Image (cartoon, rainbow, N blue to C red):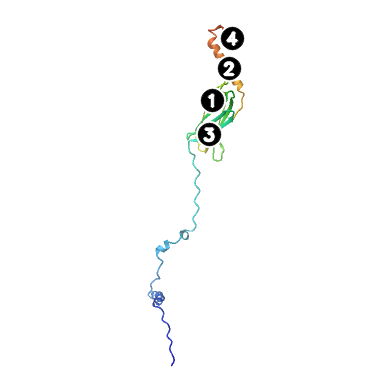
Amino acid sequence: MKQIRQRPLLPLPFILSAALPIALAAQGKPEPRIPDHAVKAQPVASQMGQPKAPAPPPPPASVFPMTGDGDTDFGGGKHGRVHAVLDASGKLRATVETWTNSPFQGFTMGVEVWALDRARGMVYRLPGGPFGVDGINTPFGSAPRRTDVLVAQLDPADVANVSQVYAFVYYAPKTRIIDIATKIHTTVRDICKTYSSDNTYFSTGCKVAGF
């Protein structure tokens, strides 16, 4: 007797999953769409492409007041310092200090204040000096310390181009003996004017000296 082999039955879920698209197509219904949230979950790069590089920031605006400082130790107790300030109105003010700690050694110095643009070009130049001092114990000498103020006014059109104030002091050799001799001459002249009319000794001496 011939045996009849039966084909194995397919699982019911498999049959349903295969028949569903066919049944939907037969009824004219569209295939299921991808939910909107799935589209929104896609990487940003796939939707927008490569991000563009940001534009470079504008150059920094000039900030006022601008200041510039210079401080130098010339050796032997000799010192110089400058502090310059430029405000938005264009007023440039520089305070210069010159001093010595030496008993007899004085010196002379100068100062430079520059207003520079962003390319370090010169917009305005304010020079100063010479500023001289004498030693602490120098007879008839100048004071061992002095303070001077320099003031200038920049044009408003130039102020807009300034981005830096640069200030420095420098050694400016000068023979201090001439200044000391001038100071002695002035002192003696003043003494003669004060006492020669009342004192024969001073009167005679002043006439001999040419006062």
The reply to whether residue 169 is visible in this rendering is no
Residue 145's label in the rendered image is: 1
State which mark lies toward you, 3 or 1: 1
Disc nearer the start of the sequence (1/2) = 1
Q: Secondary structure at mark 2?
A: helix
Sequence-earlier tag: 2 or 3: 3
Q: Residue furthest bottom?
A: 1
Amino acid type of the residue tagged 4 in the rendering: Gly
Q: Residue at x 58, y 17 (%)?
A: 184
Dot 4 or dot 1, earlier in sequence: 1
Dot 2 or dot 4: first in sequence order is: 2
| Circle 1 crowding by C-alpha within 10 Å: few under 14, some 14–19, many from 20 | many
Q: Which mark is residue 69?
A: 3
Q: Which mark is residue 184?
A: 2
Q: CA distance from mark 2 to mark 4?
A: 15 Å
Asked where in the image residue 203 lies, by quadrant, the reply is: top right
Which dot marks residue 205? 4
What amino acid is labelled 2 in the image?
Ile
